[in-house]
Amino acid sequence: MQTTINVSGMTCGHCVSAVTMELSLLPSVTEVEVDLETGQVTITSDIAMDQTQVATAIDEAGYELVSN
């Protein structure tokens, strides 16, 4: 199952690493792909993602989840 979200504030490779690491720690996440240019993050998981958990992980990484 794939979920695509928009994240604001990412500007460099470190940003990509931080977001990828935090999201990868969520249960059932199997892959995280970040497009730095667009701010889109695609999360692949075994089950539907809990938006609260996703928002918390993005916040922990130091960025903001943008409402679609």
Image: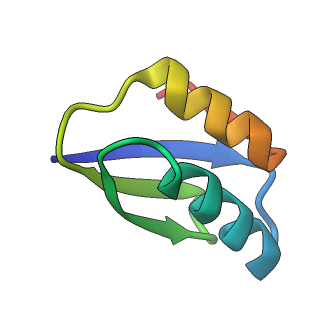
| 18 is higher (above) or lower (below) than 66 | below
Question: Percent x, y for residue 26?
Answer: 47, 43
Query: Farthest bottom residue?
Result: 13
* Scheme by which the image is coloured: rainbow
Q: Quarter-wise, where is residue 50 in the image?
A: top left
Question: Percent x, y for residue 22?
Answer: 63, 52
At 67% from the left and 70% from the top, the residue drawn is 16
Question: Percent x, y for residue 25?
Answer: 53, 51
Question: Percent x, y for residue 64?
Answer: 73, 36
At 18% from the left and 37% from the top, the residue drawn is 47
Number of numbered discs visible in the structure rendering: 0
At 62% from the left and 71% from the top, the residue drawn is 37
Left or right: 63, with 31 as reference point: right
Left or right: 9, with 8 as reference point: right
| 56 is higher (above) or lower (below) than 8 | above
Left or right: 62, with 65 as reference point: right
